[in-house]
Amino acid sequence: MTIVDDVEAKAVTLDAEAAAFAVATTDDDAVDVKKDGPPPTPGVESDLDLLAKGSHDEALVRKMALVNNALDEIGFTPYHLKLFFLNGWGYGADSMVLLVQSVIASPAYTEFGSEGFKKALTIAVYVGMLAGAIFWGFSADIIGRRLAFNVTLLLASIATIIAGAMPNWPALATMIAIIGFSAGGNLILDTAIFLEYLPHKYQYMVTLMALFWGIGQAIVAIAALGFLVPDKWNCSDPEDCTMSNNMGWRYVAFTCGAIMLVGSILRLTVVRLQETPKFLLGENRDDDVIETLNYFASRANRPFSLTADQLKACGEVRSSHGRKKFSFGEVAIHLKGLFEHWRLGLSTLLLWLSWAGIGLIYPLFYVFLPDYVKSRGTAYDVSTYDSWKYYVITNVVSVGGPVLGAWMCNLPVLGRKWTMVLGALSGMACLFAYAADSNVNIDTTLSALSGFFINVYYGTLYAYTPEVLPSAHRATGDGVSVGVNRIMGILSAIIGTYADTSTPVPVYICAALFGFLAIVSALFPYEPYGRRSS
């Protein structure tokens, strides 16, 4: 059974259950609005809404519960399926950006005379992603999600194509930074937008969507295998290396940029994204909330009973913005909202700690894996082609990590937290074994398994993060999380410059960090399984 078939099959039973609950709750609330003013908060008493307890904005809590009821009542629609594939492609583009710069860095550096800072591209992409995460993260909570969603992937794809034509090392590093800035914003919005449209029983699909991260990795690895192996497109001597005999890395950039461009055009023409109902809720645009819900519900012939009058009767949301939207005070409001009470504050800090840890693990393993693979290939007397072939295998196998993670996190006994714990511990075990083995076949197997379990953890963390952040401040929290991640990526480039990445030391560091992240995951105060995000 395909992923699409599985989703559609589950929709038949889950939508019926969700609609029955939502209709009953919403109808009762409508009566209360007329008789006694603001309705009770549906779902709070039953602990269905994850972040309702502890919130000081009762109007927002009540309105969020009503909108969640409506989303459950509407159920999973073809519009959600479009978002799954085209938002998911944003995941793929982000992973492609990271890996493209890592695989083209060495041949490009050789062509440009091996002068300048060797890890400049790694630092450039992470600096760009850091700036993008902060800029697009804060702006998406201030002006909305739609603009960033439509612009970021398009900019990243065009810049990737242009990067393939750069004439020197500084120009290439500058373009890589621009790519990172664009992709850094794209990644934040993909999960937030998809989550803010989903019925709560389908929130596990945010984890499943991370399979596109592995697909993006696989595309880059296959492009590298095709263009960075043939002698006619690659040179090894800086003294006799020109653009004409070293086109391989440029072809990788052109190919990956073109694939990203197709995805960005499809996002603009197929999805035609409306502003998310939960962002509009924080803006007190109650009429627009109903219009947005009706936009995708009517196309699927899914009625819902929520009205603008019910939302307006709950009162005015006051915690989403400061007095002036475009000010430092506005930024402070969104940061403060992530620490509204001690439990949310603890959750936010542990999230940022987790993103810092995986921010060091991922580049140390994936970005510098080509160097390590080449050194192992030399030790095993493996050809350049076979070394890249093993790299492709590692990345293709990693596609299955988020698929397993999505299945695990939807099991009551595991949920999101324990899926991350098991993913981290499994990744730790594989990385320790990978660094210690001395057989080419075992080496390939353990490398692939390490990538697989890294993506089990990473994919679940990507989905867990927006689930436990309040909607009014979600993009800000996501942006800071990814920003911390990128700071550690910059640190990894410095480590990669002054440490020998052809030795197993970085792999041992990754393994130890994974053990630490397993402990952090177990300490998370929220478990989103079976609960509704704000």
Image (tube, grey):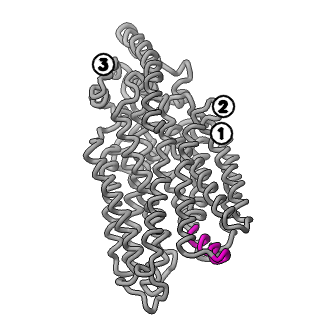
Residue nearest the observer in this picture, 400 or 474: 400
Residue 331 falls left or right of residue 440: left
Q: CA distance from mark 2 to mark 3?
A: 40 Å
Give the residue displayed 43% in from the left and 62% down from the top: 97
Q: How many marks?
A: 3
| Res. 124 visible in picture | yes
Q: Which residues are magenta?
A: 369-381
Q: Secondary structure at mark 2?
A: loop
Of all residues, the one furthest to the top in this rendering is 35
Q: Please identify the quarter of the rendering in which residue 289 is found.
A: top left
- Residue position for label 3: 309
Which residue type does callout 2 highlight?
Val
Tell me if residue 29 comes above or below residue 265 in the rendering: above
Decide which of tag 1 and tag 3 comes sooner along the chain: 3
Residue 271 falls left or right of residue 444: left
The main secondary structure of the magenta stretch is helix
Q: Please identify the quarter of the rendering in which residue 275 is found.
A: top left
Percent x, y for residue 307? 31, 19
Give the residue displayed 61% in from the left and 71% down from the top: 372
- Residue position for label 1: 418
| Res. 287 visible in picture | no
- Residue position for label 2: 413
Q: CA distance from mark 1 to mark 3?
A: 41 Å
